[in-house]
Image (tube, grey):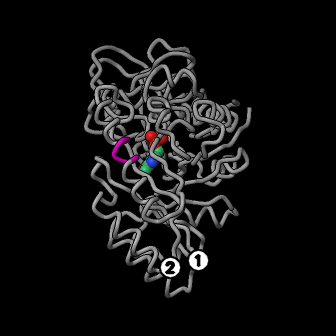
Amino acid sequence: MGKVGETTLILDLSALEHNYNYLRSQIKPETKFLGVVKAFAYGSDMVTIAQKLEQLGADYLAVAYVNEGVLLRNAGVKTPILVLHPLVSNFEEMIDRCLEPSLYSKHILNQFVKVAKAKQQSNYPVHIKFNTGLNRLGFAEDDVDFIAKATQHSGCIKIVSTFSHLAASEDSNERDFSLKQINSFKNLSSKLIEALGYPLIRHMLNTSGIINYPEAQFEMVRSGIGLYGYGNEAEVDAQLKPVATLKTIISQIHQIEAHESVGYNRAFKSHQPIKSATLPIGHADGIGRQYGKGRGSVIINGKKAPILGNVCMDMIMVDVTGIDCKEGDEAIVFGPEKSAEKFAATANTISYEILTAISQRVKRVVVHQ
Ligand SMILES: *Cc1c(COP(=O)(O)O)cnc(C)c1O
Protein backbone atom coordinates (compact mmCIF):
# COMPACT_ATOMS: atom_id res chain seq x y z
CA MET A 1 0.00 0.00 0.00
CA GLY A 2 3.04 2.27 0.19
CA LYS A 3 4.44 4.30 3.05
CA VAL A 4 2.68 7.44 4.19
CA GLY A 5 4.33 10.69 5.24
CA GLU A 6 1.39 12.03 7.20
CA THR A 7 -1.96 10.86 8.54
CA THR A 8 -3.68 9.34 5.53
CA LEU A 9 -6.89 7.47 4.79
CA ILE A 10 -6.07 5.05 2.00
CA LEU A 11 -9.10 4.02 -0.04
CA ASP A 12 -8.83 0.81 -2.00
CA LEU A 13 -11.26 0.78 -4.91
CA SER A 14 -10.56 -2.86 -5.69
CA ALA A 15 -11.91 -3.67 -2.21
CA LEU A 16 -15.02 -1.65 -3.05
CA GLU A 17 -15.42 -3.61 -6.27
CA HIS A 18 -14.99 -6.88 -4.40
CA ASN A 19 -17.63 -5.89 -1.82
CA TYR A 20 -20.03 -4.69 -4.51
CA ASN A 21 -19.68 -7.99 -6.37
CA TYR A 22 -20.10 -9.98 -3.15
CA LEU A 23 -23.28 -8.13 -2.18
CA ARG A 24 -24.63 -8.47 -5.72
CA SER A 25 -23.93 -12.22 -5.55
CA GLN A 26 -26.29 -12.40 -2.54
CA ILE A 27 -29.26 -11.04 -4.50
CA LYS A 28 -31.04 -12.04 -7.69
CA PRO A 29 -29.45 -10.73 -10.89
CA GLU A 30 -32.57 -8.69 -11.68
CA THR A 31 -32.73 -7.01 -8.25
CA LYS A 32 -31.61 -3.40 -8.46
CA PHE A 33 -28.78 -2.15 -6.26
CA LEU A 34 -28.69 1.19 -4.49
CA GLY A 35 -25.32 2.26 -3.10
CA VAL A 36 -25.55 4.42 0.02
CA VAL A 37 -22.90 7.15 -0.15
CA LYS A 38 -24.17 9.50 2.58
CA ALA A 39 -21.77 11.12 5.05
CA PHE A 40 -18.88 11.35 2.56
CA ALA A 41 -19.42 7.70 1.65
CA TYR A 42 -19.16 6.61 5.28
CA GLY A 43 -16.25 8.93 5.94
CA SER A 44 -14.22 8.01 2.85
CA ASP A 45 -14.55 10.07 -0.33
CA MET A 46 -18.07 10.48 -1.65
CA VAL A 47 -17.29 11.54 -5.20
CA THR A 48 -14.67 8.83 -5.81
CA ILE A 49 -16.88 6.11 -4.36
CA ALA A 50 -19.98 7.29 -6.22
CA GLN A 51 -18.09 7.42 -9.52
CA LYS A 52 -16.76 3.91 -8.95
CA LEU A 53 -20.24 2.60 -8.07
CA GLU A 54 -21.61 4.29 -11.18
CA GLN A 55 -18.94 2.55 -13.24
CA LEU A 56 -19.73 -0.79 -11.56
CA GLY A 57 -23.35 -0.40 -12.58
CA ALA A 58 -25.17 0.60 -9.40
CA ASP A 59 -28.77 1.47 -10.29
CA TYR A 60 -29.24 4.15 -7.67
CA LEU A 61 -27.24 6.14 -5.14
CA ALA A 62 -28.52 7.55 -1.85
CA VAL A 63 -27.41 10.45 0.31
CA ALA A 64 -28.95 11.71 3.52
CA TYR A 65 -29.10 15.43 2.73
CA VAL A 66 -29.45 17.61 -0.32
CA ASN A 67 -26.02 19.24 -0.06
CA GLU A 68 -24.43 15.80 -0.37
CA GLY A 69 -26.35 15.17 -3.58
CA VAL A 70 -25.29 18.58 -4.92
CA LEU A 71 -21.62 17.63 -4.47
CA LEU A 72 -22.22 14.50 -6.53
CA ARG A 73 -24.02 16.37 -9.30
CA ASN A 74 -21.23 18.99 -9.36
CA ALA A 75 -18.77 16.14 -9.93
CA GLY A 76 -20.80 14.92 -12.91
CA VAL A 77 -22.47 11.89 -11.31
CA LYS A 78 -25.47 11.00 -13.51
CA THR A 79 -26.96 8.02 -11.62
CA PRO A 80 -30.35 8.71 -10.01
CA ILE A 81 -29.85 9.94 -6.44
CA LEU A 82 -32.34 9.33 -3.65
CA VAL A 83 -32.20 11.90 -0.84
CA LEU A 84 -33.18 10.03 2.30
CA HIS A 85 -33.87 13.01 4.52
CA PRO A 86 -34.89 16.07 2.52
CA LEU A 87 -36.04 19.18 4.33
CA VAL A 88 -38.49 21.75 3.00
CA SER A 89 -35.85 24.47 2.75
CA ASN A 90 -33.94 22.36 0.18
CA PHE A 91 -36.74 21.52 -2.26
CA GLU A 92 -35.92 24.08 -4.95
CA GLU A 93 -32.28 23.09 -5.09
CA MET A 94 -33.30 19.46 -5.09
CA ILE A 95 -35.35 19.91 -8.24
CA ASP A 96 -32.69 22.10 -9.88
CA ARG A 97 -30.12 19.34 -9.38
CA CYS A 98 -32.36 16.35 -10.26
CA LEU A 99 -32.24 14.88 -6.78
CA GLU A 100 -35.13 12.60 -5.84
CA PRO A 101 -36.76 13.08 -2.44
CA SER A 102 -37.89 10.48 0.03
CA LEU A 103 -41.33 11.78 0.99
CA TYR A 104 -42.03 10.63 4.51
CA SER A 105 -44.92 12.71 5.85
CA LYS A 106 -48.03 14.59 4.71
CA HIS A 107 -46.31 17.88 5.43
CA ILE A 108 -43.25 16.99 3.35
CA LEU A 109 -45.35 15.64 0.49
CA ASN A 110 -47.59 18.73 0.39
CA GLN A 111 -44.66 21.09 0.53
CA PHE A 112 -42.79 19.22 -2.17
CA VAL A 113 -45.83 19.27 -4.46
CA LYS A 114 -46.12 23.02 -3.93
CA VAL A 115 -42.51 23.63 -4.98
CA ALA A 116 -42.69 21.15 -7.89
CA LYS A 117 -45.84 22.94 -9.16
CA ALA A 118 -44.24 26.36 -8.83
CA LYS A 119 -41.31 25.02 -10.85
CA GLN A 120 -43.71 23.60 -13.46
CA GLN A 121 -42.59 20.03 -13.10
CA SER A 122 -44.42 17.01 -14.43
CA ASN A 123 -43.82 13.42 -13.28
CA TYR A 124 -40.97 14.50 -10.99
CA PRO A 125 -39.59 11.25 -9.50
CA VAL A 126 -40.28 10.80 -5.77
CA HIS A 127 -40.05 7.94 -3.29
CA ILE A 128 -42.51 7.08 -0.54
CA LYS A 129 -41.11 5.98 2.79
CA PHE A 130 -43.21 3.96 5.22
CA ASN A 131 -42.58 3.63 8.91
CA THR A 132 -42.90 -0.05 9.83
CA GLY A 133 -41.43 0.06 13.32
CA LEU A 134 -38.20 2.04 13.39
CA ASN A 135 -40.25 5.09 14.33
CA ARG A 136 -37.83 7.50 12.75
CA LEU A 137 -39.19 8.74 9.40
CA GLY A 138 -42.10 7.49 7.35
CA PHE A 139 -45.80 7.50 6.56
CA ALA A 140 -48.21 5.37 8.55
CA GLU A 141 -50.55 2.74 7.18
CA ASP A 142 -53.51 5.12 7.33
CA ASP A 143 -51.77 7.52 4.97
CA VAL A 144 -51.93 5.29 1.87
CA ASP A 145 -55.12 6.87 0.48
CA PHE A 146 -53.80 10.35 1.16
CA ILE A 147 -50.53 9.57 -0.68
CA ALA A 148 -52.30 8.13 -3.73
CA LYS A 149 -54.84 10.98 -3.97
CA ALA A 150 -52.34 13.75 -3.35
CA THR A 151 -50.04 12.31 -6.01
CA GLN A 152 -52.80 11.89 -8.58
CA HIS A 153 -54.21 15.38 -7.97
CA SER A 154 -50.82 17.04 -8.00
CA GLY A 155 -50.11 16.28 -11.64
CA CYS A 156 -46.45 17.11 -11.04
CA ILE A 157 -44.89 14.18 -9.18
CA LYS A 158 -44.56 10.51 -9.99
CA ILE A 159 -43.84 7.90 -7.35
CA VAL A 160 -41.07 5.61 -8.60
CA SER A 161 -40.39 3.61 -5.49
CA THR A 162 -41.63 2.86 -2.03
CA PHE A 163 -39.48 1.72 0.83
CA SER A 164 -39.05 1.11 4.53
CA HIS A 165 -36.12 0.49 6.85
CA LEU A 166 -35.46 -2.37 9.27
CA ALA A 167 -34.77 -1.47 12.89
CA ALA A 168 -32.60 -4.46 13.79
CA SER A 169 -31.59 -6.32 10.62
CA GLU A 170 -28.27 -7.38 12.17
CA ASP A 171 -29.84 -8.77 15.36
CA SER A 172 -31.02 -12.39 15.22
CA ASN A 173 -32.80 -11.91 18.57
CA GLU A 174 -35.11 -9.47 16.81
CA ARG A 175 -35.92 -11.76 13.91
CA ASP A 176 -39.64 -11.84 14.68
CA PHE A 177 -39.76 -8.07 14.78
CA SER A 178 -37.92 -7.81 11.45
CA LEU A 179 -40.26 -10.33 9.83
CA LYS A 180 -43.20 -8.32 11.12
CA GLN A 181 -41.73 -5.18 9.57
CA ILE A 182 -41.20 -6.97 6.26
CA ASN A 183 -44.75 -8.28 6.27
CA SER A 184 -46.17 -4.92 7.11
CA PHE A 185 -44.15 -3.30 4.29
CA LYS A 186 -45.39 -5.95 1.88
CA ASN A 187 -48.99 -5.05 2.73
CA LEU A 188 -48.45 -1.29 2.68
CA SER A 189 -46.65 -1.33 -0.65
CA SER A 190 -49.35 -3.55 -2.22
CA LYS A 191 -52.02 -1.16 -1.04
CA LEU A 192 -50.16 1.82 -2.44
CA ILE A 193 -49.48 0.11 -5.78
CA GLU A 194 -53.14 -0.84 -6.03
CA ALA A 195 -54.29 2.68 -5.22
CA LEU A 196 -51.92 4.19 -7.79
CA GLY A 197 -52.58 1.62 -10.50
CA TYR A 198 -48.96 1.28 -11.60
CA PRO A 199 -45.99 -0.75 -10.34
CA LEU A 200 -43.32 0.65 -8.02
CA ILE A 201 -39.80 -0.40 -7.11
CA ARG A 202 -40.02 -1.71 -3.53
CA HIS A 203 -36.98 -1.79 -1.23
CA MET A 204 -36.42 -2.59 2.40
CA LEU A 205 -33.01 -4.21 2.96
CA ASN A 206 -29.79 -2.58 4.14
CA THR A 207 -26.52 -4.55 4.27
CA SER A 208 -27.46 -6.85 7.15
CA GLY A 209 -30.92 -7.22 5.65
CA ILE A 210 -29.37 -8.48 2.39
CA ILE A 211 -27.52 -11.13 4.38
CA ASN A 212 -30.27 -12.12 6.81
CA TYR A 213 -33.53 -11.59 4.88
CA PRO A 214 -32.76 -12.26 1.19
CA GLU A 215 -36.40 -13.27 0.68
CA ALA A 216 -37.32 -9.61 1.24
CA GLN A 217 -35.13 -8.10 -1.48
CA PHE A 218 -38.21 -7.03 -3.52
CA GLU A 219 -37.04 -5.01 -6.58
CA MET A 220 -34.07 -3.21 -4.99
CA VAL A 221 -31.71 -3.31 -1.99
CA ARG A 222 -29.79 -0.48 -0.30
CA SER A 223 -26.30 -1.14 0.92
CA GLY A 224 -23.90 1.17 2.71
CA ILE A 225 -21.61 -0.41 5.30
CA GLY A 226 -21.14 -3.62 3.31
CA LEU A 227 -19.72 -1.68 0.37
CA TYR A 228 -17.10 -0.25 2.72
CA GLY A 229 -16.16 -3.72 3.94
CA TYR A 230 -18.11 -4.30 7.14
CA GLY A 231 -21.03 -6.63 7.71
CA ASN A 232 -21.97 -6.33 11.39
CA GLU A 233 -20.94 -9.94 12.04
CA ALA A 234 -17.68 -11.84 11.80
CA GLU A 235 -18.80 -14.32 9.12
CA VAL A 236 -19.88 -11.49 6.84
CA ASP A 237 -16.78 -9.42 7.59
CA ALA A 238 -14.74 -12.42 6.45
CA GLN A 239 -16.33 -12.17 2.99
CA LEU A 240 -15.72 -8.44 2.67
CA LYS A 241 -12.62 -6.25 2.36
CA PRO A 242 -12.21 -2.97 4.25
CA VAL A 243 -11.99 -0.12 1.74
CA ALA A 244 -10.37 2.35 4.15
CA THR A 245 -7.04 2.04 5.93
CA LEU A 246 -6.14 4.80 8.38
CA LYS A 247 -2.40 5.22 8.76
CA THR A 248 -0.17 7.73 10.46
CA ILE A 249 3.51 7.98 11.42
CA ILE A 250 5.66 8.41 14.50
CA SER A 251 6.61 12.09 14.94
CA GLN A 252 8.72 11.68 18.07
CA ILE A 253 9.79 9.04 20.57
CA HIS A 254 10.27 9.78 24.29
CA GLN A 255 11.83 7.79 27.05
CA ILE A 256 9.46 8.16 30.03
CA GLU A 257 10.88 7.49 33.49
CA ALA A 258 8.98 5.94 36.39
CA HIS A 259 6.72 8.53 38.09
CA GLU A 260 6.60 10.77 35.01
CA SER A 261 3.31 11.43 33.23
CA VAL A 262 2.23 11.67 29.60
CA GLY A 263 -0.16 14.20 28.08
CA TYR A 264 -2.86 16.56 29.28
CA ASN A 265 -4.11 16.36 32.85
CA ARG A 266 -1.31 13.89 33.45
CA ALA A 267 -3.88 11.21 32.68
CA PHE A 268 -1.17 8.57 32.24
CA LYS A 269 1.30 8.12 35.08
CA SER A 270 4.18 5.74 34.63
CA HIS A 271 5.15 3.21 37.28
CA GLN A 272 8.18 2.03 35.37
CA PRO A 273 10.36 3.34 32.56
CA ILE A 274 8.54 3.15 29.23
CA LYS A 275 8.95 4.39 25.67
CA SER A 276 6.23 6.55 24.14
CA ALA A 277 5.63 7.58 20.54
CA THR A 278 3.76 10.75 19.55
CA LEU A 279 1.52 10.42 16.47
CA PRO A 280 0.03 13.31 14.44
CA ILE A 281 -3.62 12.26 14.84
CA GLY A 282 -6.10 13.40 17.47
CA HIS A 283 -9.73 14.05 18.23
CA ALA A 284 -9.87 16.68 15.48
CA ASP A 285 -9.09 13.86 13.04
CA GLY A 286 -11.84 11.65 14.46
CA ILE A 287 -10.13 9.73 17.26
CA GLY A 288 -12.48 10.64 20.11
CA ARG A 289 -11.39 11.04 23.72
CA GLN A 290 -13.13 7.78 24.54
CA TYR A 291 -10.28 5.93 22.80
CA GLY A 292 -7.80 7.33 25.31
CA LYS A 293 -6.40 5.88 28.52
CA GLY A 294 -5.34 2.57 27.04
CA ARG A 295 -8.63 1.66 25.40
CA GLY A 296 -7.72 2.24 21.75
CA SER A 297 -4.46 1.13 20.23
CA VAL A 298 -2.56 1.31 16.95
CA ILE A 299 -0.29 -1.21 15.24
CA ILE A 300 3.38 -0.33 14.85
CA ASN A 301 5.68 -2.79 13.09
CA GLY A 302 3.13 -5.54 13.70
CA LYS A 303 2.77 -4.87 17.43
CA LYS A 304 -0.04 -3.35 19.47
CA ALA A 305 0.67 0.12 20.89
CA PRO A 306 -2.08 1.33 23.29
CA ILE A 307 -2.95 5.02 23.62
CA LEU A 308 -1.37 6.63 26.68
CA GLY A 309 -3.50 9.11 28.64
CA ASN A 310 -5.85 11.54 26.98
CA VAL A 311 -6.34 11.97 23.26
CA CYS A 312 -5.25 15.53 22.30
CA MET A 313 -6.81 17.59 19.53
CA ASP A 314 -4.01 16.90 17.05
CA MET A 315 -1.99 14.09 18.61
CA ILE A 316 -2.00 10.86 20.55
CA MET A 317 0.84 9.32 22.48
CA VAL A 318 1.12 5.53 22.37
CA ASP A 319 3.08 3.00 24.36
CA VAL A 320 5.87 1.52 22.22
CA THR A 321 7.79 -0.11 25.05
CA GLY A 322 9.42 -3.23 23.64
CA ILE A 323 8.52 -2.34 20.04
CA ASP A 324 11.39 -1.92 17.66
CA CYS A 325 10.49 1.40 16.06
CA LYS A 326 11.84 4.82 15.18
CA GLU A 327 10.63 8.29 14.27
CA GLY A 328 9.05 8.20 10.79
CA ASP A 329 7.79 4.61 11.16
CA GLU A 330 4.21 3.86 10.23
CA ALA A 331 1.29 3.32 12.62
CA ILE A 332 -1.93 1.66 11.49
CA VAL A 333 -5.13 2.74 13.24
CA PHE A 334 -7.49 0.48 11.27
CA GLY A 335 -7.64 -1.34 7.96
CA PRO A 336 -7.41 -4.92 6.74
CA GLU A 337 -4.78 -5.63 9.48
CA LYS A 338 -7.15 -4.51 12.24
CA SER A 339 -10.75 -3.82 11.39
CA ALA A 340 -12.45 -0.52 12.10
CA GLU A 341 -15.10 -2.60 13.87
CA LYS A 342 -12.48 -3.92 16.33
CA PHE A 343 -10.98 -0.48 16.85
CA ALA A 344 -14.47 0.97 17.41
CA ALA A 345 -15.31 -1.76 19.91
CA THR A 346 -12.52 -0.54 22.20
CA ALA A 347 -14.55 2.65 22.67
CA ASN A 348 -17.90 0.83 22.86
CA THR A 349 -19.00 1.98 19.47
CA ILE A 350 -19.47 0.56 15.97
CA SER A 351 -17.65 0.70 12.62
CA TYR A 352 -20.23 3.17 11.26
CA GLU A 353 -19.23 5.76 13.85
CA ILE A 354 -15.44 5.58 13.60
CA LEU A 355 -15.55 5.49 9.77
CA THR A 356 -17.78 8.55 9.47
CA ALA A 357 -15.80 10.38 12.17
CA ILE A 358 -12.56 10.63 10.16
CA SER A 359 -12.45 14.35 9.54
CA GLN A 360 -11.88 16.16 6.29
CA ARG A 361 -8.45 17.25 7.53
CA VAL A 362 -7.14 13.73 6.96
CA LYS A 363 -5.62 13.30 3.51
CA ARG A 364 -7.40 10.79 1.26
CA VAL A 365 -5.37 8.68 -1.14
CA VAL A 366 -7.16 6.45 -3.63
CA VAL A 367 -5.49 3.21 -4.72
CA HIS A 368 -6.62 0.31 -6.87
CA GLN A 369 -4.69 -2.79 -6.05
C1 LIG B 1 -27.91 4.49 5.99
C2 LIG B 1 -29.08 3.76 5.42
C3 LIG B 1 -28.93 2.54 4.73
C4 LIG B 1 -27.61 1.80 4.67
O1 LIG B 1 -27.49 0.95 5.77
P1 LIG B 1 -26.22 -0.02 5.96
O2 LIG B 1 -26.47 -0.71 7.25
O3 LIG B 1 -25.03 0.88 6.01
O4 LIG B 1 -26.18 -0.92 4.78
C5 LIG B 1 -30.04 2.01 4.10
N1 LIG B 1 -31.25 2.60 4.19
C6 LIG B 1 -31.44 3.74 4.88
C7 LIG B 1 -32.81 4.33 4.96
C8 LIG B 1 -30.38 4.35 5.54
O5 LIG B 1 -30.58 5.46 6.26
Left or right position of 44 against 162: right
Q: Nearer the viewer, residue 230 or 309?
A: 230
Residue 97: percent from left, percent from top: 60, 72
Residue 229: percent from left, percent from top: 55, 32
The residue sitting at 39% across, 78% down in the picture is: 111
Left or right position of 299 against 74: left
Q: Amino acid at mark 1?
A: Asp
Classify residue 275 by image quadrant.
top left
Tag 2 secondary structure: helix
Tag 1 secondary structure: helix
85 is higher (above) or lower (below) than 174: below
Residue 19: percent from left, percent from top: 61, 33
* Residue 263 visible, this orientation: no
Residue 143 sits inside the magenta stretch: no
The residue sitting at 54% across, 34% down in the picture is: 251
Q: Are marks 2 and 1 in contact (CB under 8 Å)?
A: yes
Q: Nearer the viewer, residue 311 or 53?
A: 53
Q: Residues within 10 Å of mark 1 (few under 14, many from 20)?
A: few
* Residue 228 visible, this orientation: yes
368 is higher (above) or lower (below) than 161: above
The disc at residue 92 is 2
User: Which quadrant is home to the C terminus?
Assistant: top right
Which residues, given as a range, are shown in magenta? 182-186
Q: Nearer the viewer, residue 263 or 229?
A: 229
State whether label 2 is within 8 Å of ligand 1: no
Q: Amino acid at mark 2?
A: Glu
Residue 41: percent from left, percent from top: 54, 48
Residue 185 sits inside the magenta stretch: yes
Q: Nearer the viewer, residue 10 or 112?
A: 112
User: Which residue does the numbered mark 1 point to in the structure image?
Assistant: 96
